[in-house]
Image (spheres, rainbow, N blue to C red):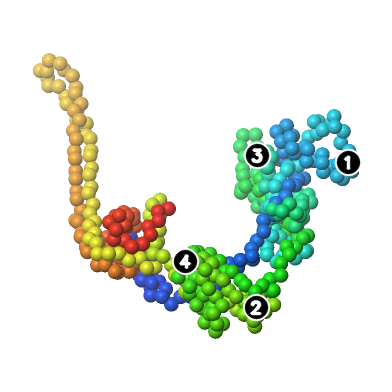
Amino acid sequence: MSSNRILLKLISTLLIVALLASSAYAVRVKELVNISGVRNNQLIGFGLVIGLANTGDRATNVFFSIQTIVNMLQKLGVTVPANRIAQLQFKNIAVVMVTAHMPPFARQGDSIDVTVSSIGDSVSLQGGMLLMTPLKGPDSLTYAVAQGSVSIGGFVVQGGAQGAQKNHPTVGKIVNGAMVEKEIPVNFNIKKDLYLSLRRTDFTTASRIAKAVNSDMKEIIATALDGRTLHLKVPAFYSDNASAFVTRIERLQVTPDTIAKVIIDERTGTVVMGENVLISTVAVAHGSLFVQIKEEPIVSQPSALSETGETVIVPRTRVVTEEGEDRLIIVPSGIGIGEVVNALNAIGVNPRDLIAILQAIKASGSLHAELSII
């Protein structure tokens, strides 16, 4: 038995086992939804990284680098004559953009990670130090301040003829590099209404979550507004304590519904089939045609009495065709994915043949699943 046949048999067995177990699986509501208003907030800032080993911005190419440095020096009490600004050269400094995500309910003094990215022509931020940089939100208010040593997790070394580089040297991180200075005002516990947003739109899953919440609370407090949003009315028992109510809801077990889907990666020959993939009655034939065309030059020597006396090369073409044994099977309607794989395995298909067969079955309208090619 070939390795492909063994692999397909193993895959079909695992799929059947997974299907038998999938009918009873359930996940927590916490893994299925997001709570409206509880999210990260993006922050951004413009700063300077100093201490670079001659890998910073070149003033001749990045004019705003010099302007930024001069502004910083003036704020620190250092006066730079206007006629000397054009002569300044700072090869150890780079202008950067600093970005961060402020988590929900962050308080003053909390530390968050920041990402530092060069916006000039700096070669590397290796060994650099980010100077104090205010991080602002979309409302232009400062919510955090970043400062610290930049770690790029790699290096760049350049010689006269060649160099070596590991990772991306112009983007780095500062773990816990920013401190929250301004809190986003929110009082979650006083909420009387909550909205849950499903991470994947599905009317059936939304309905199941609402049913599970109402069953657990012994009253109708959850309503599915559409396939992605649920409205929950906070019960009187949890008045002024919405956090405890959310904790109770997140631990409920719900079986999410999934669409029938087949994922195909033509580059690697990978086929992944989800649950509920069914097909109608269809006949599948699988055969192979082998054609070989081979050119053999034949040298024709002239005879002793030939008038021309020339050697002629005559091409000889050989065509060989072989057709493998055709196999025709009929796959009955209504069978599941495990039986589909077994049926296709019975005719000896390999993963790439399986892709072609599934595409043909989908084109015929017999495959009742979404076919996605990546």
User: Quadrant location of residue 193?
Assistant: bottom right
Q: Nearer the viewer, mark 4 or mark 1?
A: 4
Q: Which residue is mark 2?
A: 244
State the residue position of label 3: 158
In the picture of the structure, the residue carrying the numbered disc 1 is 78
SS label for mark 3: strand
- Say which label, 3 or 4, has the lower sequence index: 3
Q: Nearer the viewer, mark 3 or mark 2?
A: 2
Q: Residue at x 62, y 80 (%)?
A: 235
The one nearer the camera, 273 or 348, is 273
Q: Mark 1 against mark 2, which lies toward the viewer? A: 2
Cα gap from disc 1 to disc 2, whole angstroms: 55 Å
Left or right of residue 2, residue 167 in this image: right
> Alpha carbon of mark 1 to alpha carbon of mark 3: how far?
35 Å
Q: Amino acid at mark 1?
A: Val
Q: Are marks 1 and 3 in contact (CB under 8 Å)?
A: no
Confirm whether residue 247 shows in the render.
no
User: How far is the residue under mark 2 from the one under mark 4?
Assistant: 27 Å
User: Residue sitting at 19 percent across and 50 percent down?
Assistant: 323
Query: Is tag 2's residue or tag 4's residue first in the polypeptide sequence?
Result: 4
Q: Which residue is mark 4?
A: 202
Q: Earlier in the sequence, mark 1 or mark 3?
A: 1
Furthest toward the top, the residue is: 307
